[in-house]
Image (cartoon, coloured by chain):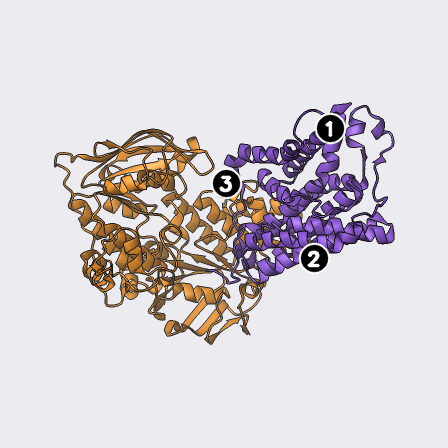
Amino acid sequence: MEPTDLSSSNPYLLEAIGLTKRFGSLTANLGVNLKVRRGSIHAVLGENGAGKSTLMKMLYGVYAPDDGLIRMDDERVVLHPPMKARGKGIGMVFQDFRLIPAMTVLDNVALAVSREGWRFRRKELRERILEVSAKYGLAVDPAAEVWQLDLGQRQRLEIVKTLLVPHTRLIIFDEPTSVLVPQEVDAFLNMLGMLKRDGYGILLITHKINEVMACADEVTVLRGGQVAYSARREEIPDGDSLIAAMMGGKELMPISKPRAESEAPKPEALTLERIVIKGDHGETVLQEAEMSLRAGEILGVAGISGNGQRELAETLFGLRRPSQGVLRIGDRELQGRGVQAFMEAGVSFVSEDPLKESVVPGLSILEHMVLDGYPLAPKRLGVDWARIRSRLSASPEAKALALADPDRKADRLSGGNVQRMVLTRALVRGPRILLVSYPSRGLDIGTTRTIQQRLIALAEQGTAVLLFSEDLDELFKLSDRLVVLAGKRLHGPFRPAETDAAAIGRLMLEGGESA
Amino acid sequence: MILSDILAGALRSGTSVMLASQGELLSERAGVINLGTEGSMLGGAMGGFAVTVWTGNPWLGTLAGGLCGLLVAAIHAYLVIVRKANQLATGLTLMFFGMGITAFFGRSFVSERIVGFNPVPIPWLSDIPFLGDVLFRHDPLTYLSILLVPCLWFLLFRTRLGIMLRAAGEREEVLFASGINPKLVRGAAVLAGGFLAGIGGVQLSVAYTHSWVENMTQGRGVVAVALVIFASWKPARAMLGAYLFGAAQALQLTVQQQGLPISPFFLFMLPYLLTIAALLLVERRRQSSTPEGLGRVFSGEAGG
């Protein structure tokens, strides 16, 4: 399973020269050069929209470049479509995994790996899976069904799958650590080191400077579709120079959180008493949860994704009914009531998968706002859309979050712009309670900071914020108190000052296993 | 003995539904709902009967019936997969198209009689008391259909083809990403499903009743579609459901023969009523096992 042909004298596995890709009037990549050595880790950094994904998709054959060429083994190669890229030994571990939840690990691997014949050797494949997972510390159970796996396990499966595809020698990782807890990140970086020693070439797309500094041999920073900076690890003075290269001239807004620890506790905005929540398959996802969220605080909910975050958030917004227990907002009991009651009580909700759950493809941003209850402006018998538009554009929330043109259709927006829209929509309601899941997912550093600052400001104005996140950095920076979802229970609350990321990370992992 | 009569009857009259439901199961596992199964069955029943009349050979009839079923399914596959038409609307249309066209071409066969398939007692096994009567005195198609179920299970869950087929029904983009054309897989599954439904129809006309009557399937194809859902897309459970339906049919016939004072219309309704009851009982469990891509249209674009 180790990469073949180490004999060649060319140290580069892949050389991309002057790659250019245009989508209509937009130039996503312009004259990008990138070389990946065998047995090395090459990190590609860049903000949202810097062209990282486009570049990777060209290297994995999803897009054909408009200009420029790609060489492997001193020969010009065509990688489009992905089948050809795979044939040349390029594998990609996507952020949103290419797995089928209803099938087993073994079946998923078989789908990707076996090529010929109508049968495949189950036993042999099973052994190869176990062999690779033992070798690189990628524990997966071949018999498990994928929907039962958490994101870390799914990622390990994706990697195993890629390694088992014959002749793989270059692996592209798309934001691999965004779904992992600190301990898993360590294990992941460790595994990257092993792959590197075995001669694999690795392309690592990431936002996280410290990981780049920890493991990369070479770094390329993209900005505006072009290479803004490129260097070997030993030439890079520190992480800040990378941030500077990514941001260009823009200034990074610092996060400042005033802590008013001494103040008397504010009134409780949302209380859970012995709440039991069931999941989509009728299984219990949360047992006897107790929680209280006070006005003016940010309560962080940590946990490996898939441990009941979605179900809990849906319950708190009336989308899902708790099977037992008391859910109080202010002093009203709302368990068993519908979404309308929760909205009237001042709850706003940003779901964990806005693309799927909060976006109607054909409607514009403006129409989304109105659909969610943004007040209309009458004009005779009709609606004064121009006035709504200018009122929306003028609102501080839209300005702060750099909302895209309100007339753009939501299905034409990038992930980051959808996130901006959904957040703006939740904020313009002036919520008393804000439930927000993964606010910075898919956003660049600049926007992330803006949003985080916005959440802090909101809490200062008295809004109770419940923040679901996997990013422990973010949780520690923003939260007044932290709870951990693991093993079907809510642990905590903890004060960020009195604990640390490693302890919370351990609870996230082990809470899941002891249950 | 009445119980063994009813159980044997369950197999005899349930086999046609069972074959159709296994076909529909293939199709739905690959992501295509085919309400045209009724049309495929009718096509199979009529075509199989006609060829048996002409050649006197029921095996040729079976082949022809299967092909007729496949032909109807091919229309469905073309419209739904290539033309991206709505699956439910297309299926319903094909159901009525099947009724019409078989009635039209079948007119001259209504009074025909054939030898067709007849029960073949299996030596020794058929002499076992009770079990022998229930299981081992059937026509060849019934035996074959029983063997088909474990084969289908093996195909779906133990072979690469099966994984491809299920992947087509769950997430086509994953299948596409691994270099296989989901449309081909879906199309093949729909055609195979139509072939099986056609043979189901043959069993009805050539082996069970030895006659052709206009619209003789009487909704069995639709029942087959319902059974697939009842069975959570599992072949063995679909077989069980089909025999349940068959048992209700046999019970109804037995009761009518006994001359009990129950309205024949009520009795006629019984099998369908039972199917509804079965659906009600299992409806809650359905959600989690539905193939994710069932009924969805694949755009053919490589996502992400």
- The residue wearing badge 1 is B254
Q: Secondary structure at mark 3?
A: helix
The chain drawn in orange is: A
Q: Secondary structure at mark 1?
A: helix
What amino acid type is highlighted by mark number 1? Thr
Q: Position of residue A24 (x, y in %)?
A: 40, 73
Badge 2 is on which residue? B71
- C-alpha separation, residue under disc 3 versus residue under disc 1: 37 Å
| In the depicted structure, whether residue B296 falls above or below residue A346 | below
Q: Nearer the viewer, residue B275 or B123?
A: B275
Mark 2 or mark 3, whichever is nearer to me: 2
Q: Mark 2 or mark 1: which is in front?
A: 1
Q: Amino acid at mark 3?
A: Gln
Quarter of the image with the N terminus of chain B in it: top right
Q: Looking at the rendered structure, which numbered label has been put on residue B40?
A: none
Q: Amino acid at mark 2?
A: Leu
Residue at label 3? B287
Above-or-below relation of A306 to B257: below
Helix, strand or loop at label 2? It is helix
- Camera-nearest label, 3 or 1: 1
**Residue A235 left/right relative to B15:** left
Task: Compute the Cα span from label 2 to label 3.
Answer: 32 Å
Q: Residue A361 at x, y = what percent?
A: 39, 58
Drawn side of residue B176 relative to residue A441, left or right: right
Q: Chain B hue?
A: purple
